[in-house]
Image (cartoon, rainbow, N blue to C red):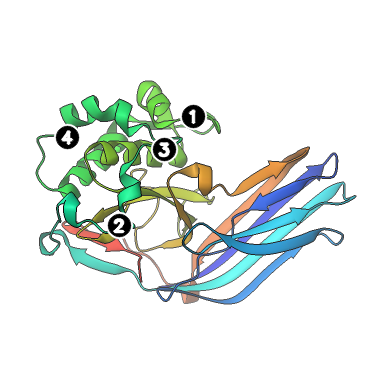
Amino acid sequence: MKFVVNAELAYEVNQRSTLLLCIHAYSTSNQLLSNEIFTTTRGATCDFFPLEAGQNRYVRIDTHDLSELLITYSVDVETNPDSQRVVDIDSVPITDVSPEALPYLFPSRYCESDELGPDAFRLFGNILGPLQKAKAVADWIFNNVTYQAGASDSSTTAMDTYRTRQGVCRDFAHLGIAFCRALSIPARYFAGYAANMHPQDFHACFEICVGNEWFLIDPTRMSHPLGMVRIATGFDAANTSVATIFGDVQLTRSSVDCQPAEGQILTPESLEGRVISLEP
C-alpha cells in the first residue's frame, strides 16, 4: 500500500521553549519512506534522534526568540501489511512468549490492567483464544464507549474511560490494552496516520502479540486496518506522545492528511476471520 502523508502544526510561543515531537513515520523493512521533508519556522533549531528500543523517531525543537512556530512534515510511505486467517495463527503459552513482548503484559501509566482484571475476566474470561478475546474486547469498546471529542484529557486513564464510557481514539486504545493485558495477552500502543479517516487526525489504536506476532486492533473502527502508517509504538501514550512541551507554547492549528497514493481506494472488503500485521 502506498500513501502520501502531510502534517502541519502551528504554535504561539510565549517564551523560549522546547518541544519534543514524534510525528515522523516509523522506518522499517515493512514500511519504506521516501521524499521525506520536515521544516520549521526559520530561527528554530532541531535535534533529531530515536528513542526506545525500536525506531520511534523524535525531534527536539528549541524555539529561541520566536513568537510563532510553524512545523510541516510530509512523506511518501509504502507499507506491506500482512493479512492472515485467524485459524492459521497458533497462540503460545506465556513460557514461550518472546522476551521482547513480556513487558507488554504489565500495567502502565495509562493502562491499569491490574485494576481492570476482575471485570476483564467477567466480560471476556469465557472466550477461547487470545485473538477471539481481543476481538471481543474491541467489539465491547465500540459498542459501549462513545467517541466524544473533548470528553477526556492528557490525564485520562483506561479506568477513567471504563467508568465514563466516553473518550477519543487514545482512550479506546488504552482501554483495549488494559483489558488485553489483564487477560494475559501482550498489548501495546500504536500511534500513526490513518488513511480515509474522517476527520483526519493523528490516530491511536493497539496491537496484540499472539504466536509471537503483533496484530493490529482498532476499536474505534474509524480507519481501515490496511490503511495505517506507523509513527510510534510504546506501552501507552506516555511514551508515544505526538508533542511534549517544556515551556509556554499553545497549539493554534493542527492539520493532518494521509491519502492512498495514485488514487487507490481502500474498499471495505470483509476482513472477517482475518487479522492484519504491520510488522516486518
**What kind of residue is marked 2?**
Pro
**What kind of residue is marked 3?**
Ser
* Image depth: mark 3 or mark 1 in front: 3
Pointer 4 local density, CA inside 10 Å: few below 14, some 14–19, many at least 20: some
Assign a secondary structure to mark 2: loop
Residue that appears at 44% across and 30% down: 157
Pointer 2 local density, CA inside 10 Å: few below 14, some 14–19, many at least 20: few
* Image depth: mark 4 or mark 3 in front: 3
* Image depth: mark 1 or mark 2 in front: 2
Q: Which mark is residue 99?
A: 2
* Image depth: mark 4 or mark 2 in front: 2
Name the outermost residue toward the right: 65
Marks 1 and 4, how far apart at CA: 23 Å
Residue that appears at 80% across and 60% down: 45
Residue situated in front as seen by the camera: 8 or 41 = 41
Assign a secondary structure to mark 1: loop
- Left or right of residue 118, residue 154 in this image: right
Q: Position of residue 260 (x, y in %)?
A: 46, 68
Q: Earlier in the sequence, mark 4 or mark 2?
A: 2
Task: Please name the residue that numbered disc 3 is placed on.
Answer: 108
Image quadrant occupied by the N terminus? bottom left
Q: State if disc 3 and disc 4 touch (CB < 8 Å).
A: no
Q: Where on the picture, by quarter, is residue 174?
A: top left
- Left or right of residue 276, residue 94 in this image: left
Q: Earlier in the sequence, mark 1 or mark 2?
A: 2
> Does residue 24 show up?
yes
Residue that appears at 15% across and 57% down: 273
Task: Please name the residue that numbered disc 1 is placed on.
Answer: 156
Residue situated in front as seen by the camera: 79 or 116 = 116
Task: Please name the residue that numbered disc 4 is placed on.
Answer: 124
Marks 2 and 3, how far apart at CA: 17 Å
Pointer 3 local density, CA inside 10 Å: few below 14, some 14–19, many at least 20: some
